[in-house]
Image (cartoon, rainbow, N blue to C red):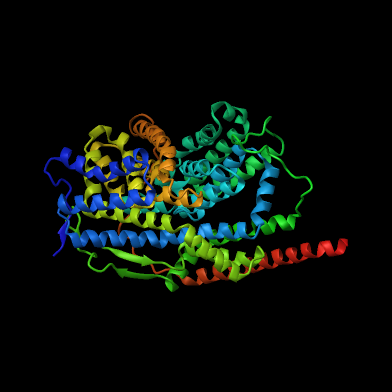
């Protein structure tokens, strides 16, 4: 017999909310006050959530255990699968010595830590968010900054904060696609509304980041570069989200801001080179120089990664990969065993898209990169084993965090918190971003938060006479600032920044910034709902009668063929340049 979710177990919403908050408040206490390790805090929080779900909400113990198992499994795939592959790819570049060339090149562009953070954490991280998403940007950029010599805490924290600007449009716009599917509002108006909110944050974010790293005065020293970075990013984000849709804003804004900042740095340099305290002065060994071929070879893993990740996001290719490599099954004992508040059974399906997953794309890039960077596959296998050992505790953290999230969602605890926020009446637009923020904190994903709350946002806005696109977009925008404190994101960043066991420090580093940005978005959303109505796009609701159409795989196979040719040409060219470079010393002698 199916069990029905409960929203107000005490028939007293205030008391129910206080109890529902216990496992969430525990995580804040454990990481900020008690300074627990991430996996310890998440495991205890999962146990607390399970106790409240079974003893207070009446969820059968068997269902609670199955819900936790479902979440943990999702944590292992696709989340941990992606993180492992991202760190593995980076470790290959380090093992081969190619990252030393990347460091030298970056030092040649600028040795200033402030500008390096803007190029890598902000702009390159946004590009990666637009292509891969789901933790890859933070994993890769944090590892790169640590490799360049950044303080690990600052590297990981800055990458988490920088990741706020692009999260809404991450992974080829999936968060907004999901918000559209759940709410019934077309993708474009949601994209437009988010694209009229986040660019305001994007303009300020580079200065904010540099101020965190070096202080307000040091940030003022490079205000021209900060302005170029923020304005170029925000302008491209606004234009692409408003006129092209949700799929490409991060890719376009990320690449555009990189190009604009690098071009600007050719004609402008900071008066002083800023480094961290107790860090050796910046030096560029002029006796070392690299040919264009050597530089391309060093960057080849990331070049290949970029091409494959973009291809994996193209819908026809995704259709082919899912047609050949997607296993889906009903989760035993859990599928349709829980009735939602509306009385309908909740399907519990587990999808293993082992070919179209972003982690698989990164694995393919790594396999192609191994000979390009001069390693053997035997050595690559050794590096992979070392990577698994390096990530053993983060894997445990991510799995337990997802178990925690699934129990909160399946038991109705999350719905209790949402119901209170939805009861705030005319002030609801102010609290709408909080709902998205809470959803991302719990699930670690803006996509998941939109799936949870977009319908609630739509219905509540309609009931108080506010355009629903404002609150649905607020769910998306509020969620992005919850990403930096999500236990899942903290675990990923800690793994990439060599901060395993120090997750509490990272959480304390980011939490205040998350609250500052959340309050800003709350006031902006309130203004959009009642004062700045000219910002709201005109749109028509989706027709829910659209028939499902089976994808035509012919185009997908064609695109895969083109991808294969492109990769073959790139690999051949890089290998040819590598052989030429090896012959140069012999010719000189």
Image coords of residue 425 (percent x, y): 23, 34
Looking at the image, residue 259 sits to the left or right of residue 184; the answer is right
Image coords of residue 126 (percent x, y): 52, 47
Choose top left, top right, bottom left or bottom right for residue 441: top left
Decide which of 363, 500 is in the foreground and name it.
500
Q: In the rendered image of this protein, does residue 153 appear above or below residue 84?
A: above
Choose top left, top right, bottom left or bottom right for residue 418: top left
Task: State which quarter of the image contains the C terminus.
Answer: bottom right
Decide which of 116, 539 is in the foreground and name it.
116
Residue drawn at (34%, 69%), measured in percent from left and top? 328
Choose top left, top right, bottom left or bottom right for residue 227: top right
Residue 467 visible, this angle: no
Task: State which quarter of the image contains the N terminus.
Answer: bottom left
Q: Residue furthest top?
A: 217
Q: In the rendered image of this protein, does residue 106 appear above or below residue 98?
A: above
Decide which of 538, 358 is in the foreground and name it.
358
Looking at the image, residue 65 sits to the left or right of residue 245; the answer is left
Q: Residue furthest right?
A: 589
Residue drawn at (54%, 58%), measured in percent from left and top? 310
Image coords of residue 424 (percent x, y): 23, 35
Looking at the image, residue 9 sits to the left or right of residue 252; the answer is left
Decide which of 11, 103 is in the foreground and name it.
103
Looking at the image, residue 313 sits to the left or right of residue 1; the answer is right
Residue 374 visible, this angle: yes
């Amino acid at each position: 017999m199916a069990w029905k979710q409960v929203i107000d177990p005490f028939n007293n919403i205030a008391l129910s909310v206080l109890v529902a908050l216990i496992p969430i408040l525990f995580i804040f206490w454990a990481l900020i006050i008690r300074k627990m390790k991430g996996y310890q805090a998440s495991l205890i929080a999962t146990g607390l959530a399970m106790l409240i779900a079974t003893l207070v909400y009446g969820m059968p113990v068997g269902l609670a255990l199955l819900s936790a198992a479902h979440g943990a499994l999702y944590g292992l795939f696709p989340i941990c699968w992606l993180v492992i592959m991202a760190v593995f790819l980076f470790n290959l570049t380090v093992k081969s010595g190619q990252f030393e060339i990347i460091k030298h090149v970056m030092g040649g562009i600028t040795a200033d830590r402030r500008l390096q953070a803007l190029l890598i954490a902000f702009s390159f991280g946004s590009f990666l968010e637009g292509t891969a998403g789901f933790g890859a940007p933070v994993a890769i950029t944090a590892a790169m900054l640590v490799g360049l010599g950044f303080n690990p805490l600052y590297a990981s924290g800055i990458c988490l904060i920088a990741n706020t600007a692009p999260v809404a449009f991450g992974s080829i716009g999936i968060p907004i696609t999901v918000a559209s599917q759940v709410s019934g509002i077309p993708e474009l108006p949601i994209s437009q509304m988010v694209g009229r909110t986040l660019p305001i944050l994007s303009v300020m974010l580079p200065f904010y980041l540099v101020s965190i790293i070096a202080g307000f005065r040091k940030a003022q020293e490079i205000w021209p570069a900060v302005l170029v970075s923020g304005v170029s990013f925000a302008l491209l984000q606004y234009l692409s989200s408003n006129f092209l849709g949700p799929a490409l804003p991060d890719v376009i804004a990320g690449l555009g801001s990189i190009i604009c900042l690098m071009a600007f740095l050719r004609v402008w340099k900071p008066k002083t080179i800023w480094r961290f305290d107790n860090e050796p002065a910046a030096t560029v060994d002029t006796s070392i120089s690299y040919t264009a071929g050597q530089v391309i070879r060093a960057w080849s893993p990331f070049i290949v990664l970029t091409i494959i990740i973009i291809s994996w996001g193209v819908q026809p290719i995704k259709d082919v990969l899912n047609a050949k490599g997607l296993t889906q099954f009903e989760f035993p004992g859990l599928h349709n065993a829980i009735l939602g508040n509306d009385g309908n059974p909740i399907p519990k399906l587990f999808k293993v898209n082992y070919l179209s997953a972003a982690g698989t794309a990164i694995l393919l890039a790594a396999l192609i990169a191994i000979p390009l960077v001069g390693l053997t596959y035997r050595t690559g296998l050794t590096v992979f084993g070392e990577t698994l050992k390096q990530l053993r505790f983060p894997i445990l953290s991510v799995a337990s965090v997802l178990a925690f999230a699934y129990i909160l969602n399946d038991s109705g605890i999350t719905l209790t918190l949402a119901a209170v926020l939805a009861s705030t009446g005319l002030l609801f637009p102010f609290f709408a971003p909080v709902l998205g923020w809470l959803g991302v904190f719990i699930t670690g994903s803006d996509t998941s938060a939109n799936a949870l709350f977009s319908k609630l946002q739509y219905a509540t806005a309609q009931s108080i006479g506010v355009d629903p696109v404002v609150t649905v977009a607020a769910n998306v925008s509020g969620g992005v600032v919850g990403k930096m404190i999500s236990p899942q994101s903290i675990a990923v960043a800690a793994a990439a920044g060599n901060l395993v066991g120090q997750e509490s420090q990272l959480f304390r580093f980011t939490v205040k910034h998350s609250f500052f940005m959340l309050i800003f978005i709350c006031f902006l959303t309130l203004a959009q709902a009642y004062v700045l109505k000219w910002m709201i796009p005109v749109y028509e609701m989706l027709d829910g009668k659209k028939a499902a159409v089976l994808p035509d795989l012919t185009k997908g196979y064609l695109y895969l063929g083109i991808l294969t040719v492109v990769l073959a040409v790139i690999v051949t060219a890089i290998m040819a340049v590598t052989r030429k470079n090896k012959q140069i010393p012999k010719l000189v002698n």
